[in-house]
Amino acid sequence: MPARLTFYETDRPARQYLLDEADRYLIGRDPACTLLIDDETLSRQHARLEFRDGSWRLSDLASKNGTLIAGRPVNHHELNNDDWIEFGQVLACFDRVTQESLDADERRIGEQWQSSVQLSRVLTPAMNPEELLVRVLESFITTAACERGFVMRQEPSGEFHPDIVLPPGSSDFTGSLSVVKKACEENRAVVCSDVSHDAQLGPQPSIASGAISALAAVPLRVGDSVLGVIYVDSRRPGKLFTELDIELLQALADHAALVISVSRLRENIVDLSEMLPTELNRDSEPDVDLVRQLQRLLPRLERPGNAADAAVNGADT
């Protein structure tokens, strides 16, 4: 029966590896390791995993912070199904998997991809922004197999408030604000695949009171700008977000953010087009605010062959 090793790194998606009985696996943070875990609590060559005499055997390689199973240090250990392993401060779970479950995972991934592609095709700048965000959040909940989701908007004060909530019925956000803030500040997806084992997230009252098992916060980003954060979570025990899950969600969020930005740009251009005729007929000094809007929205044009002059002139303005 095939075996799998799943690593749970703090605020990162779960990383799953199918194990081949013909291979030996070196685990650590050395780039030469078969299973590379970039965490300072692991030694460069921390442990070795191999299939021998009909079973999978784990050996600690005199690592600095040790290898623990069920909280007990081990030097050599024959792994059993659903063994929880600590490599330094990184958790991993060893389990046996059937071919049927692998086939089911493959079908699920295909369905997720197809759903994301179909939604991306219908998201256009002509859509109402609220309708667009509802469609995206629905897709997030379906793709991530979660029970609820929020589209979070940051106020000028820095506080976050939910714009869209699914399922509807409550405007109060009861998830993890610290995860939302981190996703916004670092402009990347922040994930916890099993908060009960996460030292940073597990003790938080918002998570404990809501009995949240897994969560993900994905930024709506355009370049370095973050328009908001999409947050989803689940209360199902054993729920996890894989790297592929997050890649699909982030790609969908990036596409939605781009569509929203184009929609806003169109609205600004329409507003400016309505203001320009009046402004051009004025005899007085130009409207400074209007000029600034034009400078922000319209690209600076360079004459062919004068790129250097344009750069110098731009630096002086």
Image: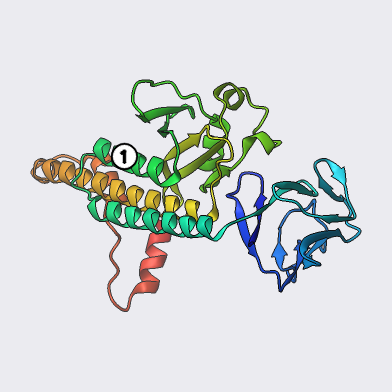
| Residue 282 pos. (x, y %) | 11, 41
Q: In which quadrant of the rendered view does residue 305 lie? A: bottom left
Indicate the position of residue 88 as horizontal and vertical percent values: 80, 49
Relative side of 77 to 6, left or right = right
Q: Residue furthest bottom?
A: 305
Q: Is residue 307 above or below residue 144?
A: below
Q: Nearer the viewer, residue 59 or 210?
A: 59
Left or right for 201, reference 235: right
Amino acid at circle 1? Leu
Q: Secondary structure at mark 1?
A: helix
Q: Residue at x 42, y 58 (%)?
A: 107
Quadrant hosting residue 56: bottom right
How many circles with numbers are drawn on the protein?
Answer: 1
Q: Is residue 206 above or below residue 222?
A: above
Residue at position x 33%, y 48% from top? 256
The image position of residue 161, as x and y in percent, is 42, 27
State the residue at coordinates (86%, 43%).
72
Give percent across and percent down for residue 104: 46, 55
> What residue is pinned by disc 1?
133
How many other residues sit within 10 Å of disc 1, few (<14), some (14-19) or many (≥20)?
Answer: many
Say which residue appears at 36% left-offset and 29% top-offset: 167
Vertical position of residue 312 compared to residue 133: above or below = below
- For the residue pair 283 and 152, the one nearer the viewer reads as 152
Q: Nearer the viewer, residue 272 or 23?
A: 23
Please state, as top left, top right, bottom left or bottom right, where the C terminus lies in the image: bottom left
